[in-house]
Amino acid sequence: MNRPSQRPELKFAILDPFSDQGIGLIRSLRRVPGVTVRPVLDGGRGVFIEAAARFLLGNTLTTKEALNLDFSVVPTTHRTTTMALTMYESHCARLGLSRTMLEVGDKREILALAESVGVPVPAQYTRDELSSGLVAFPVFYKEQHEQGGGRRGVARKVADIPTNGDDLLIEEFIETQGTYGLGFFARDGVICSSVAHFERLSSPNTGGSAVVLERFSDPRLEELTAKLLSKISYSGWGLAEFKRSAKDDDYVLMEINGKLWASSEYSWLASPDLLQTCFGLPPLTARPFDRPGLFLHRVNIAAIFALMFSGIGARPRVFIYATALAIGLGGVVRIGVAKLGQVWRRVTPYDNDCKF
């Protein structure tokens, strides 16, 4: 009698497990039957942090232990993605990741490539052009090379741009509300699965992490993203970010993040197929989550005022919770408590019959 073949055991070790995307990934994968998930800590974080990790996230491994035990080591942040693709490239290939994820980190180069295949991009300026008076302010500046954060903001005059900013990208400021994102997994330049969202509110609002996300659908986002990914034969996961230009009546590509994005858990809730495709999981029987996502731990005082003038701020209960959190937590204390809060803050979506 022939026994049915068994699916190979799926084991994932998560790098930077205290990042937003790290915690979201651990939570998501642990809801999939037959999947083993372990956070990775390589030391150097202090006794308290490592003890807290074990208490909140379970038993940990080092990267060396994970590789020896044949775990799939999953990079989450820009730092760990760069490290993994540099030191463990052949191992990353098992997950479908390639160095093209690092290539999109050169934002000037990737925008030039996008423009060459017909993807709208913002106009770019030099400091000399700004000083000449021929360029209308405000303009937007950001790091030319991806650093997982870095300097960015709106400049209303030349003096607003950091003086040590030779490596900054200065571009047209598109003053429309929110940002449109397309989370995807691609193989050899072909998108295998994707899901779009509208980032109604960010913190900071000049281009930080999402505070309010909403489901969104427009084939144009995937059409534009696919053109660029095909051009560079991109393999791996990532997030394409766009602004909507009222002047051109089209989406304008801002950048592609070649890593797991901070709000990836919301994307996986909205499209379980994307989670399945990214990690080679068995079919997931989950009803897609179609409500807005609210990331309270990212709310600060500035974001409260933005919430007051957004649609979600009109909901008294949400506004009261957000205000209490923003006022009650500040600086380092807010960040520290928020990291603990991530363990419980996303319980509600799964209560809505949205279980893997």
Image (cartoon, rainbow, N blue to C red):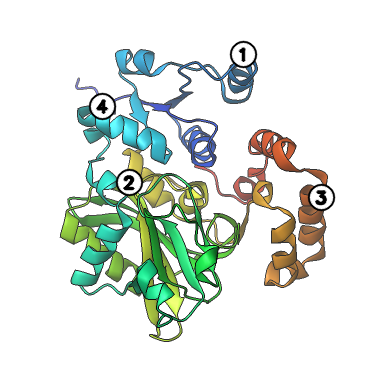
Mark 2: secondary structure: helix
Q: Residue at x 38, y 50 (%)?
A: 274
Q: Amino acid at mark 3?
A: Ile
Which of the image's four quarters has the N terminus? top left
Give how far apart the Cα atoms at labels 2 and 4 are.
Answer: 21 Å
Q: Residues within 10 Å of mark 2 (few under 14, many from 20)?
A: some
Residue situated in front as seen by the camera: 323 or 9: 323
Q: Is residue 253 left or right of residue 212?
A: left
Residue 88: give its label.
4
Q: Is residue 153 left or right of residue 148?
A: right
Q: State the residue position of label 1.
A: 47
The image shows residue 48 at horizontal and vertical percentages of: 65, 17
Q: Residue at x 31, y 30 (%)?
A: 84
Residue 277: give its label.
2
Does residue 355 appear in this view? Answer: yes
Are dots 4 and 1 in contact, CB under 8 Å? Answer: no
- Marks 1 and 2: which is nearer the front? 1
Q: Residues within 10 Å of mark 4 (few under 14, many from 20)?
A: few
Are dots 1 and 2 in contact, CB under 8 Å? Answer: no
Q: State the residue position of label 3.
A: 327
Mark 1: secondary structure: helix
Give how far apart the Cα atoms at labels 4 and 1 are.
Answer: 28 Å
- Marks 2 and 4: which is nearer the front? 4
Give how far apart the Cα atoms at labels 2 and 3 are.
Answer: 40 Å
